[in-house]
Amino acid sequence: MGSRWTGIFWSFVFLAVPVLGVATFAVAPAFDIWLPKDVSSDGATIDSLFMFILILTGVVFVITEGLLFWFLWKYDAAKATGPATYVHGNHTLEVVWAVIPAGVLLFLAIYQMNTWANVKMRRPAMSPTLEVVGRQFEWRLRYPGRDGTLGTPDDLFLVNDLHVPVDEDILIQLKSMDVLHSFFLPNLRVKQDAVPGMKIPVWFKATQTGQFDIVCAELCGWGHYKMAGQITIESRKDFNAWLESMYAKQEATQPEPAAVALAE
């Protein structure tokens, strides 16, 4: 009797996994613990691709767990009337369960090609808006100065405080100063590794104003947890005003040329 109840218990444990799993995903949006707010022009297609894969794999998961429950229930050892029998395999079945996953993966590869091209291949024909450099444990930002050219003496330097105009293409030149980091803008659906020794282009277009998180999505050392910043998406007018105020603050902290010459 004890063995019988043990079999029933484990059968329902395995049945609870898909039931609770599906229920969790079903109620998550109501508790605001689903995907972060989308403010990107490519966010809708990325989210739809995510949902398609989630539903596809979820259906397979539920079917697999359901079959596991059924076999645990039906072939309980306490009800066995004889010794177990063994089958050495079925070549046709092996081919089927190899071909079907391969076909699904091929379909997904084709289905996501346009989305992938938009976010990883179709780079905007423009100069970099700014440079982002990952460094333990901060994001160093460099904007072009008033000359509009990145890499000149009047460049603007900031840390963890990224500002961009709304409804405009933004092209970032991403670098790492030390180890591997991952530049992650959850609300803009942007996630790109910053690899030491490489300059990697990252682009997006924000569709709504607001303030959102910048995080590092790659374990980069003991201070990884605090490698966070903020991106402010604002109107072009407000962005220009912010840039001018930052230029003024930076220039106010720099010595006058005459003072530098006197010191020399």
Image (cartoon, rainbow, N blue to C red):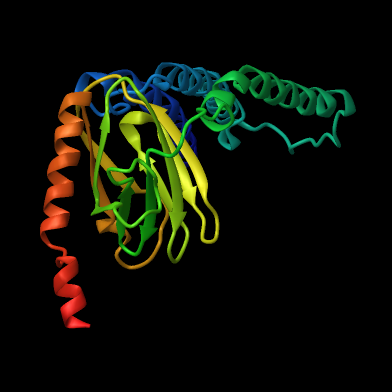
Nearest to the observer: residue 218 or residue 185: 185
x then y, percent, for residue 166:
27, 23
Q: Looking at the rendering, which quadrant does residue 226 occupy?
A: bottom left
Residue drawn at 43 percent across, 49 percent down: 182
Which residue occupies the extreme right position in the image?
Answer: 91
Q: Looking at the rendering, which quadrant does residue 110 occupy?
A: top right
x then y, percent, for residue 116:
57, 26
Of the 4 image quadrants, the one containing the C terminus is: bottom left
Can residue 70 be seen here? The reply is no
Which residue occupies the extreme bottom position in the image?
Answer: 264
Is 247 situated left or right of 191 in this image?
left
Nearest to the observer: residue 186 or residue 122: 122
x then y, percent, for residue 183:
40, 46
Residue drawn at 48 percent across, 48 percent down: 193
Nearest to the observer: residue 49 or residue 27: 49
Q: How many marks?
A: 0
Is 214 situated left or right of 16 in this image?
left
Can residue 90 be seen here? The reply is yes
x then y, percent, for residue 262:
16, 79
237 is higher (above) or lower (below) than 197: above
Residue drawn at 13 percent across, 49 percent down: 248
Nearest to the observer: residue 52 or residue 157: 157
155 is higher (above) or lower (below) than 104: below
